[in-house]
Image (cartoon, rainbow, N blue to C red):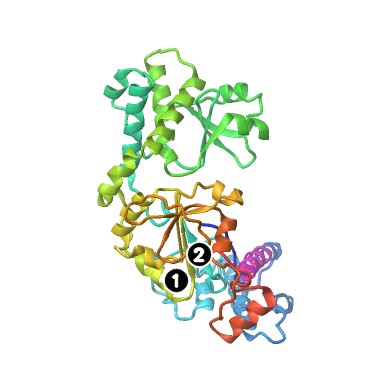
């Protein structure tokens, strides 16, 4: 996504719920003789606690506050029932929020849960990436990248040909996002939230704690400068093939007792993975057979249409070339996929798209895929552009032009708090 924004009222409500639940649990634990009353909010102290202040003029806010009080009351009631051995109804809080909830419904499939709240009513611009956002790949693509990079290691970097016959292949159960490769020793590392190396693998073998302590100065911790110089993050899903290949190559050398320099191996493997991406070889195969490598996205077109119909401005920004995204988007949405976007940007060169401020846009010829040479001063819907930067995008889209709001309440909100495209709220 381009930028992020969070709703205000629901975040406050969610925080208050958790805080209230914590305080109520603590107070319940301190009571030596809990009340057997099943009434909601029985004590005067509790009633004072959950009586929230009211807004003087905004009835919508007051409705949220009333709901909040009901939720806290339900939590209080449940905690008392649990403390006296009663049944704690897990659905009571949900019932307070939405009385239409079926108490007998146990099927959790098809539901969506979130750990943060975004009020899309206050968001007027939504940006989408292509890879692993609009389209999601299956494991066959990672297997393809792994195999291509392995062959490139043997062909271009003169690695042993026996590697091609050793049965090495991508293992989707081995790697996950969020790991890092130590450039010094070739280990696959998992860092804790305190930036300590909590776990490491040399090849497919777990590194002992003793070796971890010895390697990382007895504390398993790295300074910020050490993390920057030694560790290569594996953040995206494409990195899972990279992680698996790194471990398998190291394991091959260890099994065959082949002496090697881990630093050189890391450089070679990263180079082979990078060359595989740059060459466009796997892009061409995916463009030819999207049905083989894409996960089904049956509701994507409907979601985009609803966002568009609700007045959102949709922006497409991808690092991939036009011919590649064009083939994929035609498959998942249809021939007229470009008509859904207010701005369509390919070969964006992120993160430079965000960090640089003077990169100009180039228009792409939709028939040939070649770049035009004319100056781009305006972004038109349905057209395709290359490179550029976020600052130029705001200029070419007339980003800060005012637009009419959908209702009077929203108009009041945008005037008071800076919403609307006059001061864009972007997701």
Q: Position of residue 303 (x, y in %)?
A: 40, 68
Residue 307 image label: 1
Residue depicted at x 62% and y 77%: 37
* Quadrant of res 242: top left
Residue depicted at x 38% and y 35%: 276
Q: Which residues are magenta?
A: 11-24
Relative to the observer, which residue lies in front, 14 or 338? 338
Residue depicted at x 60% and y 57%: 391
Residue depicted at x 33% and y 43%: 283
Q: Residues within 10 Å of mark 1 (few under 14, many from 20)?
A: some
Which numbered disc flags the more N-terminal residue, 2 or 1? 2
What quarter of the picture does the C terminus occupy?
A: bottom right
User: Can residue 40 be seen here?
Assistant: no
Q: Would residue 171 be found to the left or right of residue 28 on screen?
A: left
202, above or below 258, in the image: below
Q: Are marks 2 and 1 in contact (CB under 8 Å)?
A: yes
Relative to the observer, which residue lies in front, 281 or 99? 281
163, above or below 135, in the image: above
Identify the main secondary structure in magenta: helix
* Quadrant of res 219: top right
Q: Position of residue 403 (x, y in %)?
A: 56, 77
Relative to the observer, which residue lies in front, 292 or 49? 292
To which residue does mark 2 refer? Answer: 126
CA separation, marks 2 and 1? 9 Å
Q: What is the secondary structure assignment of the residue under circle 1?
A: helix
Total labels: the figure holds 2
**In magenta stretch: residue 181:** no
Q: Would residue 343 be found to the left or right of residue 413 on screen?
A: left
Q: What is the secondary structure assignment of the residue under circle 2?
A: strand
């Amino acid at each position: 996504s381009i930028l992020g924004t969070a709703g205000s009222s629901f975040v406050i409500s969610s925080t208050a719920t958790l805080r209230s639940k914590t305080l109520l649990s603590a107070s319940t634990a301190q009571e030596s003789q809990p009340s057997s009353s099943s009434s909601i909010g029985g004590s005067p102290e509790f009633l004072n606690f959950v009586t929230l202040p009211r807004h003087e003029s905004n009835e919508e806010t007051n409705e949220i506050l009333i709901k909040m009080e009901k939720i806290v009351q339900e939590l209080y009631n449940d905690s008392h029932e649990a403390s006296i051995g009663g049944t704690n109804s897990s659905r009571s809080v949900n019932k307070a929020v939405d009385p239409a909830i079926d108490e007998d419904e146990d099927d959790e499939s098809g539901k969506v849960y979130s750990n943060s709240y975004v009020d899309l009513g206050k968001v007027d611009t939504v940006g989408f990436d292509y890879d692993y956002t609009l389209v999601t790949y299956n494991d066959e693509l990672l297997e393809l990248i792994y195999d291509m990079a392995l062959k490139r290691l043997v062909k271009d970097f003169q690695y042993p040909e026996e590697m091609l016959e050793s049965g090495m292949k991508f293992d989707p159960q081995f790697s996950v996002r969020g790991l890092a490769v130590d450039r010094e020793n070739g280990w696959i590392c998992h860092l804790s939230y305190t930036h300590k190396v909590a776990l490491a693998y040399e090849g497919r073998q777990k590194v002992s704690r003793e070796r971890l302590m010895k390697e990382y100065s007895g504390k398993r911790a790295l300074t910020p400068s050490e993390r920057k110089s030694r560790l290569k993050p594996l953040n995206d899903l494409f990195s899972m093939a990279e992680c698996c290949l790194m471990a398998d190559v190291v394991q091959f050398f260890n099994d065959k007792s082949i002496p090697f320099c881990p630093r050189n191996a890391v450089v070679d493997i990263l180079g082979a993975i990078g060359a595989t991406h740059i060459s466009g070889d796997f892009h061409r195969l995916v463009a030819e057979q999207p049905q083989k490598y894409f996960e089904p996205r049956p509701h994507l077109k409907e979601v985009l249409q609803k966002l568009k119909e609700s007045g959102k401005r949709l922006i497409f920004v991808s690092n991939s070339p036009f011919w590649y995204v064009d083939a994929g988007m035609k498959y998942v949405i249809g021939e007229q996929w470009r008509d859904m976007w207010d701005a369509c940007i390919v070969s964006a060169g992120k993160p430079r798209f965000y960090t640089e401020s003077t990169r100009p846009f180039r228009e792409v010829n939709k028939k040939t895929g070649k770049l035009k040479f004319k100056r781009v001063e305006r972004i038109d819907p349905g057209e395709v552009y290359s490179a550029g930067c976020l600052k130029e995008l705001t200029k070419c889209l007339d980003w800060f032009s005012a637009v009419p709001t959908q209702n009077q309440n929203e108009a009041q909100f945008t005037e008071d708090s800076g919403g609307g495209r006059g001061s864009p709220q972007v997701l």
